[in-house]
Image: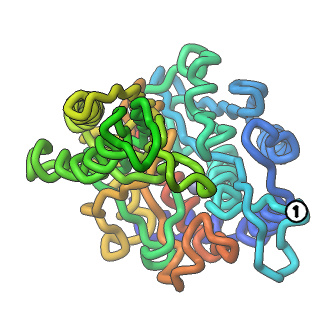
Amino acid sequence: MTDMESETRRARIESYEAELTAIRRDIHKHPEMAYEENRTADIVARNLEAWGIEVDRGLGKTGVVGTLRRGDSNRAIGLRADMDALYIHEKNTFAHKSVHEGQMHACGHDGHTTMLLGAARYLAESDEFNGTLHFIFQPAEEGLAGAKAMIDDGLFEKFPCDAVYGLHNMPGIEKGHIGLRHGPTLAASDRWTAIFRGTGGHGSMPHKGTDPTMPAAQFTMALQTIVSRNVDPLQTGVISLGHIAAGDIGSLNIIPSEVFIGGTARSFVPQVRELLEKRLAEMADAIARAHGCTVESTYTHGYPATVNWDEQTDIAIAAAQEAIGTANVNPNLNPLPGGEDFAFMLEQVPGCYAFIGNGITESDEFIHAPRYDFDDGIIANGVSYWVALARKELAKRDD
Ligand SMILES: [Zn+2]
Ligand SMILES: [Zn+2]
């Protein structure tokens, strides 16, 4: 590739910027919640069709897949964006502020949808690749597993992919830079609960019964030894208690018969995930029995860890470096303890999940905060990354 070619490519991408910014702001202004992304899916489908891309709708309820074929190669890849918003009251005052009270694009999915549309447009107007591109626009990333819903609806049977890629905006990374890593990138995000039961009784005569507040209190302390004493020191995990409830504020002389405790557990590899699950249950049970009480514990799997595949991460790093310059790419980004349902796609198909910097901002402008806004100034870099990735993955033979 000559410098001239890459400059021409960049100039063409930048020529879409104003139109893409208008699309991004329109989506921001009209946020839609999980599995209700009908207007957004209409915008996506209408644009894809206008650019001559084949469109399939309704996968995972509101998901959209655009398909573009060139040449004679059987190779196919998926590029994925998410479309859903969050239940947050937006505190921004600009013209594209949400018009839906209590709903907001505070995670930048408006920007993800827009960047992928930009890439689809560029690639539809070019013949720079050989193979099949599936542009995957999924619903319900925020907690309701839209990626899994699309997979369960036959995403990878109807649209087989040799590799799949995701891109998320991230404050705290310099504007327009790209950061990614090999291996575990985002955490498995699980929930656990433990209900300790005893007889309870009169606070003045504890010896007449069994007191579940004792095992509950000891369990609360003891569970923090799971990561520090049971997990391999070179691995990591988090267990946090988020809710504790027992008794009645109006009955301080009563020993409650039930104490509810619950929290979150995060891990980056399956072995640690299994260990957290096993040790939480064992510990709750042993401590309950030591006090003559019983316990009913649960451990519910949320999103699995997002684990990047080596070969596809190498390709993604090379694509990012070509698209925005080596100095602007961090190939050794630290893992983040958040969760992401793209993990379900990476369990099925090799791929890589990367981040694009939304700039270094104040803490109240982090994703999921009421003043967050995707920065339209990073759209061209995001589109350039997608285009470089498509060209690398589906390289023409004469390239
Ligand atoms: Zn989010
Ligand atoms: Zn997000």
Could you tell me which residue is drawn at 19 percent across and 49 percent down?
A: 227
Residue 191 at x, y percent in the picture: 44, 39
Left or right for 373, reference 395 = right
Which residue type does callout 1 highlight?
A: Glu
Which residue, given by chain and number where applicable, does mark 1 sit on?
A: 101
Could you tell me which residue is drawn at 77 percent across and 79 percent down?
A: 92
Residue 225 at x, y percent in the picture: 17, 50
329 or 318: nearer the eye? 329
With respect to residue 211, does 285 lie above or below?
A: above
Quadrant location, the N terminus: bottom left
Residue 343 can be seen in this image? no
Left or right for 106, reference 156 = right
Residue 20 at x, y percent in the picture: 75, 64
Could you tell me which residue is drawn at 52 percent across and 81 percent down?
A: 363
Left or right for 91, reference 192 = right
Residue 388 can be seen in this image? yes
Residue 108 at x, y percent in the picture: 64, 62
Quadrant location, the C terminus: top left
Q: How many badges with numbers are in the image?
A: 1
242 or 206: nearer the eye? 206
